[in-house]
């Protein structure tokens, strides 16, 4: 390299740090090897310029150089391979390779596409797009019954996601070719949508079945009743048999979660007898007088 | 493959910048699971981005444009090379 880094950068010895920096930038813009992929000489010149800037760009080093404490030798920046080296002849293809600069020639010219397409030539430029991951929160009933949700992708495009009936929490839906764009005519990647099902205030899901706890009154428990019970597809009328107790489980067949084959799981209704918030004297009087009730021991066999 | 740690060390790039560059699509790590890893190409490309940003004073929009054009130039050079080899081959044959 030139002995004098000031000459290399083309600045005066009394130049300010700002002047040195802009002189370096101006040269680097012209000489950076990656901006001159076909020019071998640029790399040599750039090295000299970079070394000179290494010395003069740092006020402390520059001062020591000016006082003659260090010289310009050995100041070269070690540099690993430049980006352009990965595009040299015979280099392997990588995700950044693109045929965008000449794809239109290949389309309109059979001879050219034959040549460029030969020997894996075209295959080198074809890379399938990346898979893109999304998360989509859905309501409990949307997952159970199925729904369509529109999501907006980072590039502003929208995507309709069909949530099939019976979709589970954390289930991943693969939308073919809705991911990142492919390179060189290769197909796009897939969009992988992870479904997050929010819990429901009434329903609990266990596999394909729905579980629900149903409060009933004392007269309903004693005498039996016909009650409206919520299910994922609306309420249905259910018969509570006479003498139904807390913990009794009734099954509503086919009122559970939709399955892929069109059938549905069941809904299990667990009864819970609930006394009114306030008891009146009538029921207190009855409980005191009720002989069989006084003798009934619900904790029999519970002794430890 | 190059780990994130090694990558940051060798490129002298901050972790936040690296994340931003990946987000901008300037870098496409070949491996994301179980953890991020990079290839030599990514390393050289990151050093180019760093040079553009730190030394040449190019702003983010400029870097996107430059990378896109550079990649196209390389694609063109490769196809030019293939074509030239084809022409040379047919002349000799």
Image: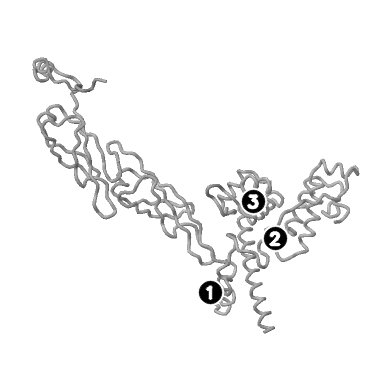
Q: From the viewer's side, name the closer residue of A46 and A16.
A: A46
SS of the residue under disc 1: helix
The percent position of residue B81, horizontal first and vertical second, equals: 66, 72
Distance from Cα at disc 2 to Cα at disc 3: 16 Å
Indicate which disc residue A107 carries. 1
Q: Marks 3 and 1: in contact by CB < 8 Å?
A: no
**Crowd around label 2: few <14 · some 14–19 · many ≥20 (10 Å):** many
x 74%, y 53%: residue: A79
Discs 2/3, front: 2
Distance from Cα at disc 1 to Cα at disc 3: 35 Å
Q: Marks 3 and 2: in contact by CB < 8 Å?
A: no
Residue A113: name its quadrant.
bottom right
SS of the residue under disc 3: loop
x 35%, y 54%: residue: A162
Residue A196 higher or lower than A121, as above or below: above
Q: Marks 1 and 2: in contact by CB < 8 Å?
A: no
**Crowd around label 1: few <14 · some 14–19 · many ≥20 (10 Å):** few
The chosen color scheme is one colour
Mark closer to the chain start, 2 or 1? 2
What subunit carries mark 2? A
Distance from Cα at disc 2 to Cα at disc 1: 28 Å
What subunit carries mark 1? A
- Asked whether residue B62 is in view, the answer is no
What residue is disc 2 on? A35
- Asked whether residue A118 is in view, the answer is yes
Indicate which disc residue B59 carries. 3
- In which quadrant of the rendered image does the N terminus of chain A lie? bottom right
What subunit carries mark 3? B
């Amino acid at each position: 390299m030139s002995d004098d880094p000031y000459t290399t950068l083309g600045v005066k010895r009394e130049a300010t740090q700002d002047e040195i920096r802009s002189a370096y930038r101006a040269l680097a813009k012209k000489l950076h090897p990656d901006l001159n992929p076909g020019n071998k000489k640029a790399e040599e010149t750039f090295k000299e310029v970079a070394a000179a800037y290494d010395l003069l760009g740092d006020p402390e080093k520059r001062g020591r150089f000016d006082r003659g404490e260090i010289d310009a030798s050995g100041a070269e920046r070690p540099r690993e391979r430049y980006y352009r080296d990965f595009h040299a002849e015979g280099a392997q293809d990588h995700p950044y390779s693109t045929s965008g600069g000449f794809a239109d020639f290949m389309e309109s010219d059979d001879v050219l596409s034959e040549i460029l397409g030969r020997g894996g030539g075209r295959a080198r430029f074809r890379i399938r797009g990346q898979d893109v991951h999304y998360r989509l929160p859905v309501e409990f009933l949307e997952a159970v019954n199925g729904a369509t949700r529109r999501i907006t992708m980072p590039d502003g495009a929208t995507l309709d996601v069909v949530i099939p009936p019976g979709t589970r929490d954390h289930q991943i839906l693969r939308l073919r070719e809705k991911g990142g764009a492919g390179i060189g005519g290769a197909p796009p990647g897939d969009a992988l949508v992870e479904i997050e099902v929010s819990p429901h205030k009434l329903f609990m899901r266990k596999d394909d079945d729905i579980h629900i706890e149903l409060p009933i009154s004392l007269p309903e428990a004693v005498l039996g009743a016909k009650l409206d019970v919520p299910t994922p597809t609306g309420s249905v009328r259910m018969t509570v048999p006479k003498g139904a107790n807390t913990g009794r489980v009734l099954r509503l067949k086919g009122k559970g979660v939709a399955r892929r084959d069109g059938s549905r799981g069941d809904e299990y209704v667990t009864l819970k007898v609930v006394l009114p918030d306030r008891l009146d004297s009538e029921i207190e009087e009855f409980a005191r007088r009720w002989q069989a009730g006084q003798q009934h021991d619900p904790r029999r066999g519970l002794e430890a | 493959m190059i780990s994130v740690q090694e990558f940051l060390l060798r490129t002298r790039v901050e972790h936040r910048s690296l994340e931003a560059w990946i987000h901008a699509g300037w870098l496409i790590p070949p491996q994301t699971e179980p953890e991020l890893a990079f290839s030599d190409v990514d390393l050289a490309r990151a050093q180019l981005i760093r040079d553009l940003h730190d030394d040449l004073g190019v702003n983010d929009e400029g870097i996107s444009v430059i990378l896109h054009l550079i990649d196209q130039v390389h694609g063109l050079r490769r196809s030019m090379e293939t074509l030239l080899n084809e022409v040379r081959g047919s002349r000799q044959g």
